[in-house]
Image (tube, rainbow, N blue to C red):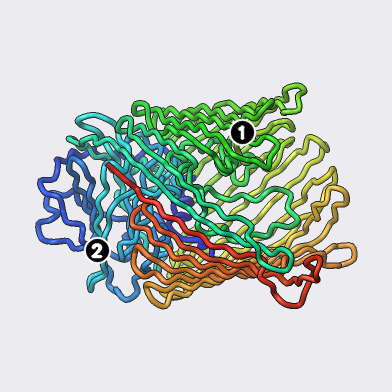
Amino acid sequence: MKRLLNARYTLAALAGLLLVPAAFPALKTLELPLAKKAPVIDGKLESGEWDGAYTMTEFKTFQPDFGKDPSQKTEAYFLYDAHHLYFAFRCFDTEPSKIKASLSKRDDMFADDFVGVILDTYNTMQSGYGFLVNPLGIQGDGMMGINGDLQGDQDFVWDSKGQIDDQGWIVEYRIPLQSIRFPAGETITFRVGYFRQFVRTSEVASAPAIYPDKGSIIAQTQPIVVSGLKFKRVVELLPAVTYSNRLAADGGELRRDERLTDLSLTGKVGLTTDLTLDATLNPDFSQVEADAGQVDVNLRYQLYYPEKRPFFLEGNEIFAISGNTEEAPLYALLHTRTIADPSFGFKLSGKLGLKNSIAGIFARDNQPEAADAHPSFSIFRIKHALKDDSYVGGFYTGRYSEGGYNQVGGADGRIRLSPTATTEFHLFGSFTKNPDGGSIESGHALGLRYNWGNRKAMVDLGYQDISKDFRVDTGFLTRTGIRRLAAFGMLMFYPESKFFQRIEPFYWSYHIYDTASAMLETFNIFVLRFYLPGSTQVRFEGILANEVYEARRFERNGYGARFQTQLTKHFFLNAFYRRMGSILYDPDDPLQGDGNRASAGVSFQPTDQLAFLVDLTYADFTQRSDKAKLYDFLIVRSHNTFQVNKYFFLRAIAEYNTYYKRWTVDTLASFTYIPGTVVYVGYGSAFERVRWDGEDYIAGDKYLETKRGFFFKVSYLWRW
C-alpha cells in the first residue's frame, strides 16, 4: 500500500517556506570540542556516557502548527570524535503502550513514531543528509533537498539501536565519517537539526524551532563548529552474483524462457573528503521486487517508475532542476532508467570547494533488441551555491548511437528576491540528429517559477514553454509544443479545536496553449483539506477542466475526495475517489467519455514483526454518447511481511489484475546486514485464464500457470 505518511509529506509540505531570516536573529554558532570517550551504541543512556554532549530540549512543533510546545518532551544529544558523529534521543511518552513502532526493513519505518537528524556538512543550506530512527532502532535515510523534501533513495552505512521503556523510548546512533562527505580543514562548520514525529497526535517537532517566515528548513538548523575530523579515504568494493531461471508457457507446457547468471563488480574511491568516484562492470541492476501494478491502458503518456538501482543513487539529488511547478511536463533531464542495461559505467559526484556541487555519469548501454544496440550516455551537472539558499547551475546530457545523437544543454537556478519570495528558472536547448541522416533538429525548454508564503497563505506561479522539437532522450518528458501557465494559492487556518488541527482551502490550475492546434486547454481544481489527530487527512475537491487531444477539445469536469487515518496503533486506512470527464486516447478516433478512478488500502500490524497490507486500484471508461462501458480495470494487491529481526524478513505478495485476468504470486526471503551486504531468494508465478487448444493459447475458464521464475542474489560490501 502506498502510504501517505507524515514525515516525507510533512517535510515536503514545507517546500514553500523558503524565506530569508529577516525579523529573526540568526542562531549563534557553537564551538564543540572532540569527545573524550565514545559512547556505546546500545539504546541505553548510561550515566556519564553523554557528558559534554551538545544537548537540545527546546523542541517546537512545525506540524500541524508552528512554535507550539509538543505533547511530549524530547532530549537530543550530539558528540563527535575524529572518525564518527554520535547522536542520541530520550523521547518521553506518558502512554508508552501507544507508541507506534514496527520491526521492519530499513526505509520502511516512515509511518512510525521516529526521530531524525539533518546534517548540512557544508553549511550552504542547499542540501543535507537525513538519518532517521524509529523506537526499535530501524533506520531510514536519504538526502534533504533545497525545498525541504527528504528523498529516501540513498542508503548509508551507520549504526543505530533503540528500545521502548516505561518512560517512552531511547535511540542512539553512530555515523562514520566515511559514510558522508564534508569539506577538508582542521575546523569546519556543520548545520545540525533534530526532529521528532508523533503519529497519534499528528505532530512533528524540531529543535531548533522552524518558522514559516524565518527561512528554509536547512537554513534554520544549528551551526556548529567542529575540529579535528580525520579523512579516512573511502574505498569500497561490491561484488555481486545474480542468478535467475525463468519459465514461460510454450506449446502447452512450461519451458525455459531464460536462465541467466550475472557477475558484477562495483567500486568506490573517495578522491577527497568531498569527491567520490564510482566505477562498475556489468553492474547489478536487478530489481528484487517488481513495481506495484499500475493502470496501463488508455494512457496519453508513459508511466514513470522511480530509480531503485544503487549505482545511480549517490549524488542523485544534484541532478534535480529548478523552475518546475507540480506536474510540469519536463519532469527530469536525467531519468536514469533510460540507461537500461549498461555494460560499464563511471560516476563522479561531490564537491569542488564549499560552493560547487558536481556530478557526472558516463555509461555504455546494452540494448541488443533496439536499432542502436550500444548507445553511450554522457551526463554532467554543476551547481554553484550563492548567498542563503540561492544557486545557479549548468546541465549537459548526451545520448549517442551509431550515426545519431541527442544532446541537451543549458542552465537553471534559484534566486531569493525578498524575505518572503524566491524565483526559479531553467532554459535548455536540445540538438538531435537521427541515425537515418537528415538535418539536425533543435528545440528549447523554458521554465520560470515564483513562490511566496507565510504561516497563513502561500502562492506558487509557474510558466513553461516547450517547443515541439525539444527532445531529451536521457530524461522524462510528457509533452512538447506547449506554453503552460500554472497557479497555486492556499490559505491556512488553525482553529482552536481538539478535532480540527488545520484547515486548508486551496486552488491549483494550469492553462495550456497547444501550439500545434492553436487551441487552449485548462485544468482548475478547488480543494478543501482538513488535518485531524491520528495522522488523519480529509479532502474534498471539485474540478473544472478540458483537454486538447488530436486538435479537439474534450470536457474533463469532475469531483473527488481523499481520506487517510492511523485509525489505531495497528490499523491504517486510506481511500481516494475521483469522477471526471475522460478521453479515449485513440489517435484515429478519440472519444469523449466519463471515468471513475478509485483506490483504497488498509494496513494491519498485529505485532511489531507482522504487517498485512491490501491495496485496491480501479479505473474505468464509459463512452458518453451511448453509455457503453469500454473497459474497467481493477488491481488487487496483498503485501504480507514477517520481519524476523532487523536484518531478515519473509514476504509474500499476491496481485490480481481483472483487465488482463492475471494472478501473480511472489515470495521473497531477504537478508540485509548493511547496505550492499545482502542475500535475496525469490520465487514467483503468473496465472492467466487461458487454455492450450493444441495449436494456440485461447481464453479459458480456469487459471493456467503461464510464467514461473526463481531469483537469487548475493553481494558483499568490502570497505576499507
Which residue is disc 1 drawn over?
375
The residue lying toward the viewer, choosing from 349 and 593, is 349
- The answer to whether residue 277 is above or below residue 139 is above
Give the image location of residue 558, x and y in percent. Answer: 73, 60
Give the image location of residue 699, x and y in percent. Answer: 79, 71
Residue name at image x 84 percent, y 47 percent: 587
- The answer to whether residue 462 is above or below residue 590 is above
The three-letter code of the residue at mark 2 reads Ile
Quadrant occupied by the C terminus: top left
The three-letter code of the residue at mark 1 reads Pro
Residue 298 sits in quarter? bottom right
Disc 2, disc 1: CB below 8 Å? no
Residue name at image x 35 percent, y 74 percent: 98
Residue 68 visible in the picture = no
The residue lying toward the viewer, choosing from 164 and 431, is 431
Binning the other alpha carbons within 10 Å of mark 1 as few (below 14), some (14 to 19) or many (20 upward) gives many
Q: Earlier in the sequence, mark 2 or mark 1?
A: 2
Binning the other alpha carbons within 10 Å of mark 2 as few (below 14), some (14 to 19) or many (20 upward) gives many
Helix, strand or loop at label 1? It is loop
Q: Which mark is on residue 293?
A: none
Which residue is disc 2 drawn over?
170
Q: Gap in Å between the C-alphas at discs 2 and 1?
A: 51 Å
Helix, strand or loop at label 2? It is strand
